[in-house]
Amino acid sequence: MAQTETAPLQRSGPASGSGQGSKPGTGSGAMPNVYASGRLGKSVPWIVLGASLLVSIAIFALVQVASGGGFNVAGAVVLTGVLNGVAIYLTALLVEGGRQAKDRLVTTLVSSAFIIALAPLVSLFITVLSRGTARFDVQLFTESMRNVVGEGGGALHAIVGTLIMTGIAALISVPIGLLTSIYLVEYGRGALARAITFFVDVMTGIPSIVAGLFAYALFAIFFGPGIRLGIAGAVALSVLMIPVVVRSSEEMLRLVPNELREAAFALGVPKWLTILKVVLPTSIAGITTGVMLAIARVIGETAPLLVAAGFTANMNYNPFDGRMQSLPVFVYSSYVSQGTDAQAYLDRAWAAALTLILIVMALNLIARLVARAFSPKLGR
């Protein structure tokens, strides 16, 4: 039987090397098309944003010349965002298609929302920093306002009062909040646990002035009406701190794997020792972060301290004896009770506000460092 030979398959189209079958735009002498793959270059969104900004500035500059008024910065920013969103959507629609165009539009909207949310914070910090540096000197941290009616003086009494009252509030709130969270996670069942959870949620949303009125009424029962004490201000702050500590600690304790508890129980370790030696060390980083954030949340409260602790121009290191000044109340009183030299009072108010912001930033930084230092190490 004769064998039939099969001819090799011939590749259709022009012969290789002729250059006729190459992609458009890739032949010799032709400019390469960076969008041949259907994707925008990395620099295109920034170019579109810059062009939108230039167009917006040009439009509002013409409006300024025509009206004779000032340049509207906020309007220019808003128009830039609108033009950028429309331009990036149309550009991506022409090059990448409808799906990628929608993705880029949503990305632009999310980025714009982030910038809008961040703008007030940046503006506030810049304003406080520019106005607070006028009196941010050594005298601010070494002198009080005793017998000062014009220039000079400092906020030492307010800084000391803030640290004392906030420290006492932390000593009251942290044990109560931590023990409550341990009960809810490890022991709490039934109606009592549900009632505690409900009241913690209610306390989280109460106005700060209510906490101040509660502390004032509590101490007025024992010392009579009109009493103002530093310890009363600390109690008011602790009322605001406790629900925050409970909620943050509860969430951190629930993140501890049950396998760790079961392993300790299997070795015969009692439950209280398991909590002390296993659960708490595992969640200590998150708990510490929550406590620091709770302190940063209450350290700037004004209304409860104004009601419960009052204000004074003198130094007071004893929270159980007389009124005690705090930084938020110092800022408030300096602004609303300006003396003969109003600018001196305003400068002290801005400097005290800057000091308070720096204290809060320091507390948040400490919380992050503690969380990083005590977080469980996953590597061997």
Image: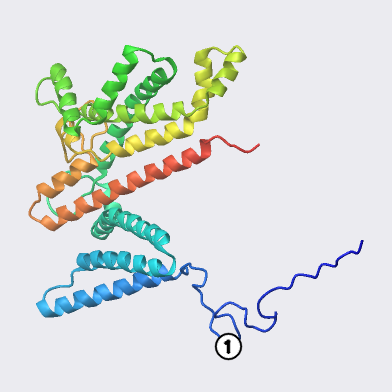
- Could you tell me which quadrant the C terminus lies in? top right
Please tell me which residue is depicted at 28% across the width and 64% down the height of the picture. 81
Q: Is residue 91 above or below residue 365?
A: below
Q: Is residue 332 above or below residue 86?
A: above
- Could you tell me which quadrant the N terminus lies in? bottom right
Can you give x and y, in whole percent of width and height, for residue 211 in the image? 20, 28
Q: Is residue 52 above or below residue 271?
A: below
| Type of amino acid at the residue the image marks with label 1 | Gly
> Residue at the right extreme?
1
Q: Is residue 62 left or right of residue 29?
A: left
Q: Quadrant of residue 264?
A: top right
Residue 148 visible from this viewpoint = no
Please tell me which residue is depicted at 62% across the width and 14% down the height of the picture. 267
Can you give x and y, in whole percent of width and height, for residue 198 in the image? 28, 22
> Residue at the front extreme?
1
Q: Quadrant of residue 132?
A: bottom left
Q: Nearer the viewer, residue 178 or 171?
A: 178
Q: Is residue 98 left or right of residue 348?
A: right
Colouring convention used in this rendered image of the protein: rainbow
Q: Nearer the viewer, residue 252 or 89?
A: 89
Can you give x and y, in whole percent of width and height, for residue 316 in the image? 23, 34
- Residue at image mark 1: 29
